[in-house]
Image: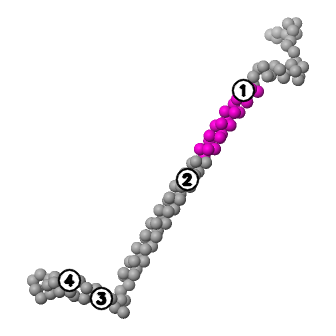
């Protein structure tokens, strides 16, 4: 099965073929068109695949950034709560209450204090 292509040939100078259609047969054993089309198809598929991979990477990084920001805000909130709790536990009134109530400690009298030199 042969394919024929038609094209108009214009030759300047030789007025015989001016404006006439000339049929050119393509050699079917010439596979360069097939190889070129396969190569172009592979290139287009590779470009499309790399674009999809790139977009998926961007979306995944967006999700990771969102998770990291959520974790960061949770840790900041926990840090604030722990600082408040630390300040409550460190307060001198609380320490004095525990020392006198649970441990039975009292303030020393004036004669119980010794100055060491």
Mark 1 Cα shell of 10 Å, populated few (<14), some (14-19), many (≥20)? few
Task: Of the two numbered discs 2 and 3 on the same chain, state the one appearing first in sequence.
Answer: 3
Find residue 44 and report its horizontal and vertical position in percent: 43, 70
Residue 8 tag number: 4
Q: Residue at x 28, y 86 (%)?
A: 5
| Left or right placement of residue 1 versus residue 70 in this view | left
Q: Residue at x 69, y 33 (%)?
A: 81
Q: Residue furthest bottom?
A: 1
Where does label 3 land, which residue?
4
Mark 3 Cα shell of 10 Å, populated few (<14), some (14-19), many (≥20)? few
The magenta stretch spans which residues?
68-89
The local secondary structure at tag 3 comes to: strand
Q: Is residue 68 above or below residue 110?
A: below
Q: Is residue 18 above or below residue 117?
A: below
| Left or right placement of residue 8 versus residue 116 in this view | left
Where does label 1 land, which residue?
87
């Amino acid at each position: 099965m042969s394919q024929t292509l038609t094209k108009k040939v214009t030759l300047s100078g030789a007025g015989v073929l001016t404006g006439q259609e000339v049929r050119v047969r393509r050699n079917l054993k010439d596979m360069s068109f097939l190889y070129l089309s396969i190569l172009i198809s592979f290139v287009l598929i590779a470009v499309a695949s790399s674009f999809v991979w790139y977009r998926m990477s961007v979306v995944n990084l967006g999700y990771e950034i969102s998770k990291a920001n959520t974790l960061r805000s949770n840790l900041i909130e926990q840090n604030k709560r722990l600082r408040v709790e630390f300040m409550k536990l460190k307060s001198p009134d609380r320490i004095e209450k525990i020392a006198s109530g649970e441990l039975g400690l009292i303030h020393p009298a004036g004669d119980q204090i010794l100055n060491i030199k």
